[in-house]
Every structure is written in structure tokens, then in C-alpha cells.
Image (spheres, rainbow, N blue to C red):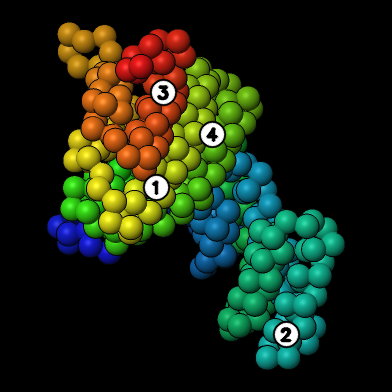
Amino acid sequence: MPRSVPVPLAVRRRLRAGARRFDGSWWQILQCGLGAGVAWILAQVLWGQPYPVFACFAVVVCLGVSNNQRLRRVGELGVGVSLGVLMGTLIARAIGHGAVQIAVIVVLTMAIARFLDGGNLIVNQAALQSVFILALPPAPGGGLGRWLDAMTGVAVALAIAAALPADPRRDVRGRALAYAGHLADLLEDAARAVRDHDAGVAEATLASARGTQSELDGWATSVAAGEEVHRLSPLRRRGRPELVQQHDLLDGMDRATRNIRVALRRITTALEYGEELPPALAGAFEQLAAAVRALGEPAWEGETMPPSVAGLQELAVQLGPRTLGATTLSATVVVAQLRSAVVDLLQAQGVPPEESHRLLPQ
């Protein structure tokens, strides 16, 4: 975030981002709580364990709040948790507890897990669970009670992940809205840099824009995971058309972001060298920010067009170099990148290519 963003604005942005993260994770959080309670009861009933902590621990670790490739992830973590608890229990019974034993168990467990599967999730969880077993006091009565607890938790987690898959569209929507909000923030900061002739703000905004690729990658992973859930779960197949739309929107946002980065780089260079940029450019960036922030909102009552598409079309007809007063090379380049970004975003929302290009002034 640019260093000169006012504190109240920064706080509002943080609160919005936090609300979006919670909205995309509440179902997974609820599943973790439900699974932990069920695993506790099952371990007590099945194995007579008075405090089956590892059953709850296994559920929470396996399910987590991620919706990406969840069934596979639960399976990998389940193997790692079970292997670590089993190895820790056997080593503790054979050679006791202590620093040397912990070093030995970490090496052995990671080696076995790596041999069985190359995934980092299995290797890391196996080592962590074995350390917990050796670091904690011996379980009352000894035996393999903790391993049975862990296996119970893993079974509950697998059952929840398979029978009650979270709607992947919620996570995808959350990521789409979060990214749109972040990109809109950057566009508003770019407008402020142009209006105030502030090269520092422009440079910081460019740096933030260059760091958005991880968010785009996370969004793409979420879309791919959603498509996998819809293939495997009959309960979720009816949502596939929305995932196709999200895939198109992601592609358009990715292309638009690349064009915006180029525009920001040119703005930064121009301001650093004292080149004047037309004030109308700031208004164009603000209009684009408003349209991006409205992505996903339904059409208003009495309207057939979503507000984002309407805003982009309204902006497109203004994006002529002469209209915006772009008389220098830098200003012309910025206008060209804005034109490309608007076309990308229109097409991502279903506007035909010929129509989106026809809106632009010649």
C-alpha cells in the first residue's frame, strides 16, 4: 500500500479485506468446529479416551480454511498426521522422551514420509506430530491411544470433506471481490498520483501492482479447485456455469492488470522527470476504479446491464487522446493502456470484442 495513503482510508481498506476473507471462510470454520466436536465424542466412545485431544487436532489440521483441492489436501495431511503420531508413539515406547529422541524421530519420520510421498504437506505434518508426541508427557495407560485418536480425527475430516464439500463458488467469489477491491485501490492511488503530481505515490502504487500476481495465482488455483469439486460432487455440479464465468473474468482481470502496470510505470517515469500529465487522466483512473469495484454486482432495478459494464462503457467512449488532453508521448501511452484494460474487462464480462472496440474513440 502506498506510504502516503491516509490512515482512515487504510483502515477502511483493511476492514473491507478482513470482511471478505471471513465471508469466504465461514463455512470451512464451521466445519472445523463441528468435526472437532464429533471426533472428540467418537474417540471417547470408540476407544475410551478421556481427553482425545489428537482427534480434534487432526480434524482442524486436515480441514483448515482452505478450499483449494480440499479432498486431496485432507488426504495428504491425514497421512502425515497419522504417520507422525504413530512413529512418535513407537519411538517414545522404545527409547523414551528427550532431545536426542526428538532429533531421531524428526529425521526418521521425515525420511519415511518423503519416501512414501514427495508432498511437503505429508512430510511437514508427519514431523510435527511426532515431535508433539515426544514433547508431551506420556499418555495415561500408554499404548497407541493417541494414534487411534488421530486416526479418528482423520476419518472424520475425510468424511466431512467428501460429504459436505464447501461450495467452491463462495471462495472463488471472495477472491474475485478481494482482487477487484485491491485493484480499485491501486487505481484510486494512481489517480491521486496524477492529480497531485506525486512521483512517490506513483512509484509505491507501481510496486504494489507488481505484487498482485500472487493474488491472481491464488484466484486461479481456487477456480481450478472449484472445477474439480464440481466434477466430483453431484451436489455442486449445477454451479459450473458460474465457474466458467469466473474463469473468463480471471483471464480478463489478468490482462487488464498487465496493462495497468504498464500505465503505472509510464506515469512513474513521467512524474519523476517532471513531465506534465493531463488532469483528465486522474478522472479516468477514478472511473475505472469505480467500475472495477462494482464487479459482480447485479444490475440495478429497471436496468439490464450490471453497473460494472455500464461504468466501463461510459468510460470507454471518453478514452480518446484528444478527449483527455494527451499531447505527450507518456500521456498517450497511459491512455492506450487504459483503453486496452477497459476492453479486457468488458470482454471478461461477456461483451463481444467488436462491440467493446467500437466504443473507443478513433
Disc sitting over residue 223 in the figure: 4
> Please, what is the three-letter code of the amino acid marked with disc 1?
Arg
> Please, what is the three-letter code of the amino acid marked with disc 4?
Val
- Position of the N terminus, as image quadrant, is bottom left
Q: Which residue occupies 46% across, 14% down?
A: 353
Among the two numbered marks 3 and 2 on one chain, the one whose residue lies closer to the N terminus: 2
Disc sitting over residue 343 in the figure: 3
Residue lying farthest to the bottom in this orientation = 99
Residue 205, given in percent of the width and then of the height, sits at 34, 54
Q: Which residue occupies 41% across, 23% down?
A: 343
Q: CA distance from mark 3 to mark 2?
A: 58 Å
Q: CA distance from mark 3 to mark 4?
A: 23 Å
Residue 54, given in percent of the width and then of the height, sits at 57, 65
> Please, what is the three-letter code of the amino acid marked with disc 2?
Ala
Badge 2 local density, few (<14 within 10 Å), some, or many (20+)? few
Among the two numbered marks 3 and 4 on one chain, the one whose residue lies closer to the N terminus: 4
Element type where label 4 sits in the image: helix
Q: CA distance from mark 2 to mark 1?
A: 54 Å
> Is the C-beta separation of discs 3 and 4 under 8 Å?
no
Element type where label 3 sits in the image: helix
Q: Which-is-in-front pick, marks 1 and 4?
A: 1
Residue 43, given in percent of the width and then of the height, sits at 57, 57
> Please, what is the three-letter code of the amino acid marked with disc 3?
Val
Q: Which residue is mark 1?
A: 266
Among the two numbered marks 4 and 2 on one chain, the one whose residue lies closer to the N terminus: 2
Q: Which residue occupies 54% across, 38% down?
A: 220
Q: Which-is-in-front pick, marks 3 and 1?
A: 1
Badge 1 local density, few (<14 within 10 Å), some, or many (20+)? many
Among the two numbered marks 3 and 1 on one chain, the one whose residue lies closer to the N terminus: 1
